[in-house]
Amino acid sequence: MSLPLRMAFVGEVSEAIRRAAEERKLKPQVLTAALMRAVMEGDLIDSVLEGNDARKLAGGQARDLETGLTLLQEGLVYLIGLNTGRDGVCRLPVAGFQARLSGSTFDGVKYALTTICSKGFARRVGTGTRYTPQPYALTPAGERVYQQLSGAQADGGEG
């Protein structure tokens, strides 16, 4: 069974979807689902993107509706969980996170790490120095996101 995909649209994209739906006397969710189904079933993704970078066309960071995390923030939660040692701590340097997250910048990763800590998905452990990276650990909320992203919470199991 596949997991549902939840997204939130903000700003001018949200308003454009609402206007287009209203003109057609549809709910915005119905219009969006219909458009996505038509694009996917018609194999029109490349035609719609016309060779443009989808991240640039998106015009901002899409957020998971449930957690409010951006893709970069989710990626960091996943990497912290994936690279956690036996002591429950991840010691990747910022450049290490950046190298594993395509399209990210050093400053973007630093800011996103601060954000996931302030939102309660990770916490700093001890202090980093000029020569050692800042260690991070997942909080229970971060652990739940990591489990979902890694597929560890999939239905079924042994039995």
Image (cartoon, rainbow, N blue to C red):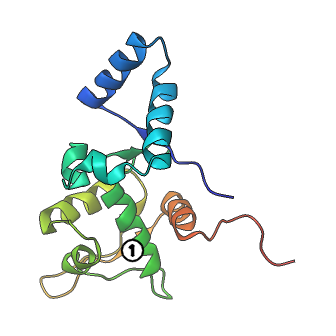
Image height check: is 157 above or below 115?
A: below
Q: Which residue is mark 1?
A: 79
Residue 131, percent from left and from top: 14, 88
Image height check: is 86 above or below 154?
A: below
> Viewed as shown, does residue 119 lie left or right of 133?
right
Residue 51, percent from left and from top: 20, 56
> Viewed as shown, does residue 23 lie left or right of 16?
right
Q: Quadrant of residue 9?
A: top left
Quick one: SS at disc 1?
helix
Seen at 40% across and 74% down, the residue is 80
**Where does the C terminus fall, quadrant-wise?**
bottom right
- Viewer-proximal residue, 73 or 49? 49
Residue 157, percent from left and from top: 77, 74
The reply to whether residue 43 is visible in this rendering is yes
Local packing at callout 1 (Cα closer than 10 Å; few below 14, some 14-19, many 20+) is some
The tally of labels here is: 1
**Where does the N terminus fall, quadrant-wise?**
bottom right
> Viewed as shown, does residue 137 lie left or right of 114?
right
- Viewer-proximal residue, 107 or 17? 17
Residue 93, percent from left and from top: 23, 80
- Viewer-proximal residue, 45 or 145? 45
The reply to whether residue 60 is visible in this rendering is no
Q: Quadrant of residue 91?
A: bottom left
Seen at 29% across and 77% down, the residue is 100
Seen at 20% across and 58% down, the residue is 111
Three-letter code, disc 1: Leu
